[in-house]
Amino acid sequence: MTLTLHDATFALLALLTLGAALGVVLARNIVHSAFLLVLTFLGVAGLFLTLDAGFLGLVQVLVYGGAISVLVVFAVMLLMSEQAGQTNPPGASRFTRWAGGVGAVALALALGAAVCTTAWEPGSGPRPEAVAELARLMLGDYVVPFEAAAVLLLLAVVGAIILAKGEDGR
Amino acid sequence: MSDQATIGIFLLLTLAFPAGAMAAAWLFRPAPIQSAEKRTPYECGVDTRGPSWMRFRVNYFLYALVFLAFDVETIFLYPWAVRFQALGLFAFVEMLVFIAILALGLWYAWKEGALQWY
Amino acid sequence: MIGISHYLLVATALFAIGAFGVVAKRNAIAILMSIELMLNAVNINFVAIDRYLAPGGALGQLFAVFVIAVAAAEVSVGLALVISIYRQRRSVNLDDFNLLKW
């Protein structure tokens, strides 16, 4: 059993992703959380690349790293009113904090046990070029979800503009 | 060497480069001088006035919103553009409908003044 | 050797971290961030399963693309809601949003 470069890359990216994700939920300053969130997104993009999903890695960087993180950072900038160190405190009651921690660990253990005990059967077959296959599926069998995604995005834009602008437009 | 290995080496190099640059700067710099001027955010340029930890206008958010919608559109456009020849007319019409629906969103944002900077 | 279970374990850990954030945080934006972490974990699962168990197609990747599109819509409306509530309550702290409680 030798450690290949692929394994080392995976380990590094997994550590980066999980460490940054822990930082997101543990940071006391919401700006730190936002930037660690970007780091998490980029780590996940790297994981996609190690999974031979180059297009999705690109999409992850473009949409999550580029647009969603910008939206989150702008929203943080809009809602600044408190001291920087207290913008992202943990829940007020000790009970919710402990319930969250214990629940999350229990969830991780249960799902992890399920992953470890399942006998995965690796599939085989020639791997098609992902982008071409995606285009074929998107505009063929899955054209209705495709157009529904367009309608969803339209409604999201309209709804978010109505909500964010408010009554007076300021 | 596989593609993943290339990515791994690239990642290690990009992590090592800033660390190396900072270490070199730390190694070769003269003894640091502590002064009030050194500690200002910008040694040259305009000093900031008032607290920088302040609220911004909603315009930034609305811009980012429209950007996000069209960013997501590109991820659907890209596979279609790559396979444009093979997919044919029907896919072209489907994509036109897709773009028209999102253009409606742009029109609404425009009408509501979300693209206006005041 | 890294296999599918390693990827799924990373996704599990990421999902659990997100779930912890949703339960234990107070800031509404932080909770939206935690939801994004959970959606990312789901995407890792989709892509890993697509890569290892069904390499003949790209269905997993297609679903990941749709998840990303829905996540974009979700985060834009969610943040707009937070901004809208902030206008009325001057707070992003979820403990202050008790409009529907009695």
Image: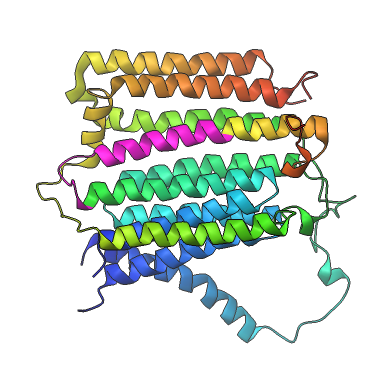
Q: Is residue A60 above or below residue A155?
A: below
Marker count (numbered): 0
Q: Nearer the viewer, residue A155 or B69?
A: A155
Which corner quadrant holds the N terminus of chain B? bottom left
In magenta segment, residue A18: no
Q: Is residue A3 above or below residue B51?
A: below
Its colouring scheme is: rainbow
Residue C60 visible to the viewer: yes
> Going 53% across and 51% down the picture, which residue do you hit?
C19
Q: Main secondary structure of the magenta part?
A: helix
Image position, residue B92 (x, y; %)? 28, 16
Can you tell which quarter of the image residue B63 is in?
A: top right
Give left or right: position of A114 versus B45.
left
Q: Nearer the viewer, residue A132 or A16?
A: A16
Image position, residue C87 (x, y; %)? 80, 31
Image position, residue A157 (x, y; %)? 57, 23
Q: Most extreme residue toward the front, as rendered?
A: C102
In magenta segment, residue C60: yes
Give left or right: position of B12 versus B25.
left
Q: Is residue B88 above or below residue A30?
A: above
Image position, residue C90 (x, y; %)? 83, 37
> Going 82% across and 51% down the picture, which residue do you hit?
B52
> Going 31% across and 58% down the picture, which residue do you hit?
A115
Q: Which residues are magenta?
A: C52-75
> Going 19% across and 50% down the picture, which residue do you hit?
C53
Can you tell which quarter of the image residue A71 is in?
A: top right
Give left or right: position of C83 versus C75.
right
Q: Is residue A124 above or below residue C4?
A: above
Give left or right: position of B61 versus B37.
left
Q: Nearer the viewer, residue A101 or B59?
A: A101
